[in-house]
Image: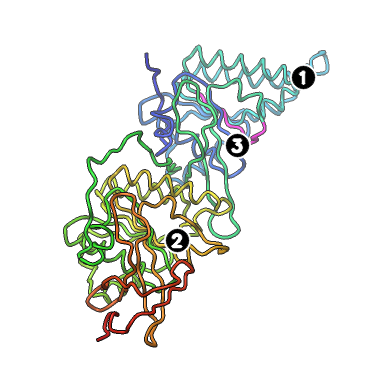
């Protein structure tokens, strides 16, 4: 028998909770100041209003005016929410305090608990938010009294079948975590530069196969939006492997027929060696076939992307205007890796994207402030999801040499299905570009080095050049005759 669920009204959170909070239980919402606890709580109550429920907000901290002013910043009307402010009960000094052996704090706590009972009896809510439970702990003073009062309150709420969120500003409350059905924690991450990032963690949820770990979220005008981590299925979702063509016969020959759908290709090399241009070739070829692509730019502007494509003879604007190609300029200081993955997922599922370009991994690296060691974990999760959707992912990595020893770089080659290396070399008094495929999991590829040229007629890949040495050092040297090179007679 499945447990009834109470939806939270927070985009993305119900997905993490596999449908919502189990109904008629109590939950702890934790987080420091400014993490969005009140915002999430009000969204939870407003969702109840939308479903025709009675809802109640009880606070020991805030004034009703302050709550309504905060809600107004989101454009919310709280007229359907019953608000009970217990500040007077918490601060009141009983006249009989001097005539009793009971401590004043316990008398005040009894006043608070009594006020909660009266409000529940009066309004008969199906949803309740209590802000904040730490004030009850402070009033109790004694841990035993605190536990007794909390358990008594929980029994009352369970009797009336109320789904309740207790708000807690301190994250150091292990004793209360054991009393509630679930624990949700909010946190702010402040990088050295850029906008503050926010994470949400479902720490505990009895009877729910929830999505574990941290998920990103953002507070916007209108409330909190949570970005669940990408769902990874246990089996391959796209039906078959197929080769995606570039329209350049020599490039496809080098790659053993082309790049395979549902795989990730790493294009690595120094700046200016044509990595983005090779990716643009695939995007343009797909657009001509009517297949959609999404390009995420971390390092350059939209106009640079269009200008580079135009210099290759590719007019990308018509495809952007008709929605076949989407170009997204990512501000690395203002977006988290979780939000980026959410945006990517939304585009793939809603627009049937076939190619995703990440230009570049260096920029993606910067979306993980203070947690940059998690780059490969985040990237692996993203590639697994895209692979299950049958999407070809082109990752651009600007570095000196991924094969050179003693050189510190981002190494994403081991999570890539195909690796293409582009290198500069000098020959006949000119700086040229060499291209080679060094890895392809799905199918074979040739082992030769070829010359690559960027022309106004597109990308040109030459025939295999056997007269090379030093390729593994990162400084290839051409020892052959000039006539073997492109544009050399």
Q: What is the CA distance from the residue labelled 2 to the residue labelled 1? A: 61 Å
Could you say where residue 313 lies in the image, as x and y percent from the top left?
A: 23, 75
Magenta segment: 164-172
Q: What is the CA distance from the residue labelled 3 to the residue labelled 1? A: 25 Å
Does residue 44 appear to the left or right of 465 in the view shown? right
The one of 230 and 78 positioned closer to us in this rendering: 230
Q: Nearer the viewer, mark 3 or mark 1?
A: 3
- Residue at which label 1 appears: 95
SS at mark 3 in the image: loop
**Quadrant including the N terminus:** top left
The answer to whether the residue labelled 2 contacts the one labelled 1, judged by CB atoms less than 8 Å apart, is no
Does residue 93 appear to the left or right of 219 in the view shown? right
The one of 296 and 130 positioned closer to us in this rendering: 296
- Residue at which label 3 appears: 62
The answer to which of marks 2 and 1 sits earlier in the sequence is 1
- Residue at which label 2 appears: 331
Query: What residue do we see at 58% from left, 63% from top?
Result: 406
Depicted 377 relative to depicted 18: above or below: below
Q: What is the CA distance from the residue labelled 3 to the residue labelled 2? A: 36 Å
**Quadrant including the C terminus:** bottom left
In this view of the protein, can residue 84 be seen by the observer?
no
């Amino acid at each position: 028998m499945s447990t009834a669920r109470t939806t939270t009204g927070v985009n993305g959170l119900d997905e993490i909770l596999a449908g919502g909070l189990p109904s008629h239980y109590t939950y702890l919402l934790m987080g420091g100041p400014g993490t969005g606890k009140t915002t999430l709580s009000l969204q939870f109550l407003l969702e109840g209003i939308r479903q025709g429920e009675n809802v109640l907000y009880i606070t020991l901290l805030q004034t009703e005016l302050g709550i309504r002013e905060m809600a107004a910043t989101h454009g919310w009307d709280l007229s359907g929410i019953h608000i009970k402010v217990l500040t007077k009960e918490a601060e009141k000094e009983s006249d009989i305090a001097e005539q009793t052996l009971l401590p004043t704090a316990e008398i005040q706590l009894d006043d608070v608990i009594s006020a909660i009972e009266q409000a529940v009896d009066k309004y008969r809510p199906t949803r309740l938010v209590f802000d904040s439970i730490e004030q009850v702990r402070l009033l109790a003073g004694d841990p035993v009294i605190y536990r007794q009062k909390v358990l008594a309150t929980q029994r009352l709420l369970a009797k009336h079948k109320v789904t309740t969120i207790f708000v807690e500003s301190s994250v150091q409350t292990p004793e209360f975590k054991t009393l509630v059905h679930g624990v949700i924690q909010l946190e702010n991450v402040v990088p050295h530069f850029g906008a503050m990032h926010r994470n949400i963690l479902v720490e505990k949820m009895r009877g729910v196969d929830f999505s574990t770990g941290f998920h990103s979220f953002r507070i916007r005008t209108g409330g909190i939006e949570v970005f669940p981590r990408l769902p990874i299925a246990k089996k391959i979702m796209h039906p078959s492997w197929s080769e995606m063509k570039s329209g350049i016969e020599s490039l496809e020959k080098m790659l053993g027929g082309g790049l395979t759908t549902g795989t990730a290709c790493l294009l690595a090399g120094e700046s200016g060696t044509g990595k983005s241009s090779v990716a643009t070739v695939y995007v343009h070829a797909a657009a001509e076939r009517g297949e959609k692509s999404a390009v995420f730019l971390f390092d350059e502007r939209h106009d640079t992307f269009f200008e580079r494509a135009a210099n290759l003879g590719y007019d990308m604007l018509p495809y952007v205007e008709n929605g076949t190609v989407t170009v997204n300029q990512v501000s690395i200081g203002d977006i988290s890796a979780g939000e980026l993955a959410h945006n990517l997922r939304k585009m793939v599922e809603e627009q049937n994207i076939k190619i995703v370009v990440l230009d570049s991994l260096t920029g993606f690296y910067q979306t993980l402030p203070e947690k940059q060691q998690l780059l490969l974990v985040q990237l692996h999760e993203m590639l697994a999801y895209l692979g299950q959707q049958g999407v070809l992912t082109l990752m651009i990595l600007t570095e000196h040499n991924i094969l050179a020893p003693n050189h510190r770089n981002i190494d994403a080659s081991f999570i890539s299905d195909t690796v293409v290396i582009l290198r500069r070399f000098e020959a006949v008094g000119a700086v040229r570009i060499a291209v080679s495929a060094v890895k392809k999991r799905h199918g074979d590829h040739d082992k030769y080095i070829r010359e690559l040229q960027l022309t106004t007629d597109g990308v040109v890949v030459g025939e295999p050049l056997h007269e090379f040495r030093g390729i593994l050092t990162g400084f290839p040297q051409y020892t052959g005759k000039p006539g073997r090179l492109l544009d050399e007679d």
